[in-house]
Amino acid sequence: MVRPTHEVEYEQMLLSRHGWMNHRGGRTKDGVLERSAYILLSRIRIQGPMSIGELSDAFGLDASTLNRQTAAAMRAGLVERIPDPDGGMARKFRITDEGARLLDEERQGLISSLDRVMADWPEEDIAAFASYLRRFNTDIERIGGRPWPRP
């Protein structure tokens, strides 16, 4: 008997192949945010300014990876470096107005795509699906020891 987790794995693999859910390549010439920038901006927006060390802890990535990602985001005008608002020594990254604008546009585009996909779904099914996704993500975060703040 095949366990249901086999089906979850397979469906997740299929989901990951869809381009509209998998942006790649920095801030492209058409203004689309790359996946790493989208996630970085989302985290900074919800948590507030963050240092490289805080980002490293939050994402479970080494500082060199975060340095590359934040440098690219700075070159694209998505984040800026500021002194620590709490008076600490480390400089922090804050989302810029342009970064916030592009993040909002990207998020709205993804929501519009999801609305098209789920156009025939009853609201209760969408709510249940969202609830299962939240549960799935929070369990992954619990196991990894890296909870993600939610609005």
Image: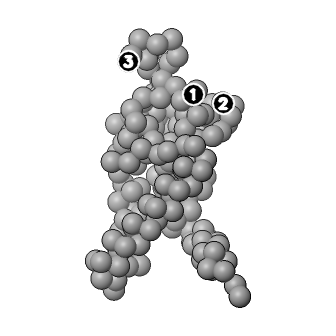
Amino acid carrying mark 1 in the image? Ile
**Image quadrant occupied by the N terminus:** bottom right
Element type at mark 1: helix
Would you say 148 lies left or right of 128 here? right
Q: Is residue 81 above or below residue 20?
A: above
Q: Which residue corresponds to mark 1?
A: 52
Residue at x-position 66% and y-position 80%:
3
Q: Position of residue 50 (x, y in %)?
A: 47, 29
Looking at this view, name the residue that lies furthest to the left.
123
Q: Quadrant of residue 129?
A: bottom left
Residue at x-position 39% and y-position 16%:
86
Q: Position of residue 45 (x, y in %)?
A: 38, 39
Residue at x-position 42% and y-position 44%:
149
Circle nearer the N terminus (1, 3): 1
Q: Nearer the viewer, residue 44 or 29?
A: 44
Amino acid carrying mark 2 in the image? Ala
Q: Which residue corresponds to mark 3?
A: 85
Q: Position of residue 88 (x, y in %)?
A: 46, 13
Q: Nearer the viewer, residue 1 or 130?
A: 1
Q: Does the CB distance between marks 2 and 3 fall below 8 Å?
A: no
Residue at x-position 39% and y-position 66%:
131
Element type at mark 3: loop
From mark 1 to mark 3, how far is it between C-alphas?
15 Å
Q: Nearer the viewer, residue 54 or 37?
A: 54
Q: Which residue corresponds to mark 2?
A: 63
Decide: few, some or many residues near mark 3? Use Cα within 10 Å; few <14, some 14-19, many ≥20.
few
Q: Does the CB distance between marks 1 and 2 fall below 8 Å?
A: yes
From mark 2 to mark 3, how far is it between C-alphas?
21 Å
Q: Quadrant of residue 140?
A: bottom right
